[in-house]
Image: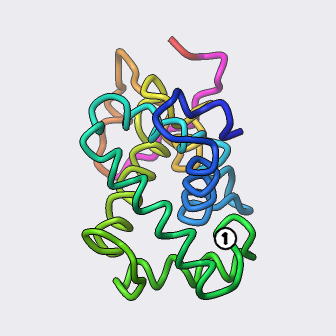
């Protein structure tokens, strides 16, 4: 799925690493679709050409460093690692234990994590949350013109809205 998301901001190898990272941050599981199905890497790729263009070089360096760290630690690039090995690499990056990152692996991890959350749960018009995968996961039906009194209650859980009921 990630091949369609570049829009030119990142190259194919960078996108493969980014897609693998986002897929480990929000994996597909018994609860539903994850970042890969929601096309989170497409969201990030588009954002790096627009509002987040200032982060493009940081992403390029961080993705290369992720692959390099993976190779140093496990003898293979990040996308060739098992899920368990990828999780170990990401944990080291998050804890700021991975070398070759500028400014630091922890800063890179925090940025990618934030953008992954945005791409998973943000408005689909920005390129992520494909088919409202993230909203479906949390039971959010999306923006509505009118909310009932019951739906406005603080503890209310709105009923999921079918895709064909979109306004």
The quarter of the displayed image where residue 95 is located: bottom left
Q: What residue is at 45 percent from the left and 23 percent from the top?
A: 125
Q: Main secondary structure of the magenta part?
A: loop
Residue 153 percent location from the top left of the image: 30, 43
Q: Nearer the viewer, residue 166 or 85?
A: 85
Q: Nearer the viewer, residue 43 or 68?
A: 68
Residue that extends furthest to the top in the rendered view of this protein: 167
**Quadrant of the image containing the N terminus:** top right
Q: What residue is at 53 percent from the left and 43 percent from the top?
A: 40
Q: What residue is at 58 percent from the left and 84 percent from the top?
A: 88
Is residue 97 magenta-colored? no
Q: Is residue 132 left or right of residue 47?
A: right
SS at badge 1: loop
Label 1, on which residue?
77
Residue 116 percent location from the top left of the image: 45, 52
Q: Nearer the viewer, residue 47 or 53?
A: 53
Density class for disc 1 (Cα within 10 Å; few <14, some 14-19, many ≥20) is some
**Is residue 107 positioned above or below 156 on the image?**
below
Total of numbered circles in the picture? 1
Q: How is the image coloured?
A: rainbow
- Which residue range is magenta in the image? 155-165
Q: Nearer the viewer, residue 93 or 132?
A: 93
Q: Is residue 165 left or right of residue 101?
A: right
Residue 61 percent location from the top left of the image: 40, 59
Q: Is residue 107 left or right of residue 85?
A: left
């Amino acid at each position: 799925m990630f091949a369609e998301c570049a829009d030119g901001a990142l190259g194919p190898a960078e996108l493969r690493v980014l897609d693998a990272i986002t897929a480990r941050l929000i994996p597909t599981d018994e609860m539903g679709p994850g970042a890969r199905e929601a096309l989170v890497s497409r969201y990030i790729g588009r954002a790096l050409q627009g509002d987040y263009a200032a982060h493009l070089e940081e992403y390029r360096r961080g993705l290369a460093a992720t692959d390099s760290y993976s190779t140093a630690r496990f003898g293979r690039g990040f996308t060739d690692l098992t899920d368990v090995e990828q999780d170990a690499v990401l944990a080291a990056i998050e804890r700021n234990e991975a070398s070759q990152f500028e400014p630091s692996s922890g800063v890179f991890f925090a940025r990618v994590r934030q953008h992954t959350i945005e791409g998973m749960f943000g408005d689909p018009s920005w390129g992520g949350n494909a088919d409202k995968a993230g909203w479906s996961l949390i039971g959010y039906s999306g923006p509505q013109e009118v909310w009932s009194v019951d739906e406005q209650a603080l503890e209310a859980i709105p009923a999921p809205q079918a895709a064909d009921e979109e306004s």
